[in-house]
Image: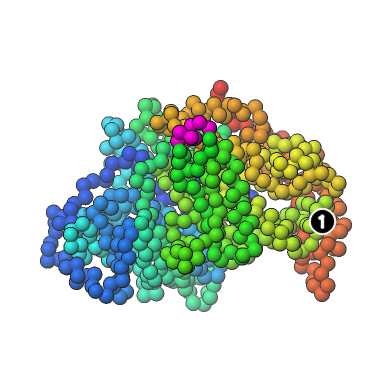
Amino acid sequence: MKCSDVPLRAMPLLRLLPIVLVPLALAACAVGRADPGPTPSPAGPDRDDDAISSYSDVITGDAVSDDGLFAVHQVDTDFFYEIPVEQFGREMLVVSRISRTAENVGWGGAKEGTAVVRWQRRGDQVLLRQVSHENYADPESTIYQSVLNSNFEPVIQVFDIDTVSDDSSAVVIQVNDLFESDVPLFGIRPQRREAYEVRSLDGDRTFIESVRSFPRNVEVRRVVTYQATEAPSDAESNTLSLEMNHSMLLLPDEPMQPRLWDERVGYFSVTRTNYGLDEQRAEQERFITRWRLEPSDPEAWARGELVDPVKPIIYYVDPATPDKWRPYIIQGVNDWQVAFEAAGFSNAIEGREPPSPEEDPDWSPEDARYSVIRYLASSVQNASGPHVHDPRTGEILESDIQWYHNVMNLLRNWYLVQTAAREENARGVKFDDEVMGELIRFVSAHEVGHTIGLPHNMKSSAAYPVDSLRTSFTCTMGTAASIMDYARFNYVAQPGDDACVLPRVGPYDIYSIRWGYRPIPEAGAPEEERPTLHKWILDTGDDPVYRFGDPSQTDPESLTEAIGNDAMRASELGIANLKRIATSLRDWTYEAGEGYAQLRELHQQIGAQWNRYSGHVLTNVGGVHWNRKSQD
């Protein structure tokens, strides 16, 4: 499976195999999709006046209410949605997350699933239906009705209308059953159900904690309890309890113009089958996933001036993040500003501290309006950067980077076994905060790259000559042409070389962001952008710096954990450094009164690094060079 084949993915920096989150439940037509059918008025053709109570009898004076996308009310333990008539038929994105977790069950802030839904009125009932965008046809085409008929939207839940607002502009439904019964769309992912042998949801131990409404989203927090034969913790209880948050976010009123995907430039993508194209087969269209960036001053932008976007990309640091690491995480976000400047934007992306409760009492990291770098108290040695996008266009709507506390141990191991032969600050079981901070900055920048649409580009490490990696060239160009490679640190540089060892946002990254984000204002449709996008690729087609490649077991230029264009020479130099490190490791890791656990772990890391170098060489035996190209 290719990274770009799925619409929602957590691309980890730190594992050879990507961690896949539950993909967007995309299910029937995209931009220009017609309304699924007439929505009856609040008075509805089948209305039974005696069956609907007065508003004040349902939403009593004791109700705790909150206005926003639509009003929400709490009356004792009952929760109600007051849905305006104009919201019926509009598409909303549901994002389900684990807020607080049991031991060994994911982590707080992890996404469990996403789906597109719509509310629909049917007489004295309201339907919640799941929407698909996998198949499409222009509403003006003759085949459009056939596409609708072949993609009937499933009904997730049916609600009786409890009352109607006094001015008949909205209907009120009780939503307890949606969140207190076993609705798979709002539950834990199927893989967890299978792993923990979940038998059923216990409604008596499942309840809503709070419901809040904001201008474009509604947030529900609930405790959910499952009966599980193989509960991951407290196994004797046969119980799995979690706190989950569910965001219902209104999709953009005006869909963004999509940009067509091209295999020669790495982007995550969303795919649909367009039955309305003038082709003699069912043709698929793929759009890249990207944030919506529009110049605030189009005239100045057209003159070649850098301008701020109408809406910048903002990432907040989780309030749970230790204070000393926050500046480095924020700097990793801001490192991408240079790439967006190539697309004509200033201040396009920014890392920020979260607002205090006094500054914004409603701010929450679970709120789907905010992108947050979530700090996770976990022993997992990893980080990942998923995003959520509009399935109609590929527009990224929000992202929550998953930052595991124990990623620092992995960074310590890599940095020591790859650079300690010449970097004195890498010699020890615990680094100075400034050293670890710069390593954290690198991880932050890599994961942000995933959340702005970029997959791994393993081919970029082969763009640089091995000899250049031993010089000051690396201080401006990094260890590879893209920070999205698994290039890690400069293991080629020898003691005495005038070289830098850390990755950085590179020339390929700047090129790919320009290709994906630079507006083409003269193009009124995705297909009209194609000649310009093709030309931008051809302009750099002969330069290996601008090539893209997935991880490969057969392509010597698309190796993970490798740097340089000659694996034999690079590995030879790397092994020379490993020999220097192995002979000094006992001295560098000595701690009076401590055991040998740290020394044992680092010796194992040296062995693993030697295996990587050998594997890089082996791939050259019978390897195949893969280069993506068009017929011209």
Judged from this view, the residue extending furthest toward the bottom is: 236
Left or right, residue 418 beside residue 223: right
Judged from this view, the residue extending furthest toward the top is: 632
Q: How crowded is mark 1: few (under 14 residues within 10 Å), some or many (20 or more)?
A: few
Residue at coordinates 46% horizontally, 71% vertically from top-left?
241
Residue 563 in sight in this render = no
Left or right, residue 611 beside residue 38: right
Q: Which colour scheme is used?
A: rainbow
Percent coordinates x, y for residue 511 in the rendering: 59, 36
Residue at coordinates 32% horizontally, 41% vertically from top-left?
33
In depth, the one of 270 and 443 nearer the eye is 443
Residue range (magenta): 298-304
Percent coordinates x, y for residue 315 in the rendering: 53, 54
Where is 316 relative to 66, above or below? above
Quadrant of the snapshot with the C terminus: top right
Q: Is mark 1 on a helix, strand or loop?
A: helix
Rendered image quadrant of residue 221: bottom left
Where is 86 relative to 199, above or below? above
- Is residue 303 in the magenta section? yes
Rendered image quadrant of residue 401: bottom right
Three-letter code for the amino acid on which mark 1 is drawn: Glu
Left or right, residue 61 beside residue 588: left
Left or right, residue 59 beside residue 410: left
Residue 533 in sight in this render = yes
Quadrant of the snapshot with the N terminus: top right
Percent coordinates x, y for residue 610 in the rendering: 78, 50
Q: Could you tell me what secondary structure mostly forms the magenta stretch?
A: helix
Residue at coordinates 33% horizontally, 57% vertically from top-left?
69
Rendered image quadrant of residue 615: top right
Percent coordinates x, y for residue 309 in the rendering: 48, 43
Look at mark 1 in the image and give the residue it sits on. 424
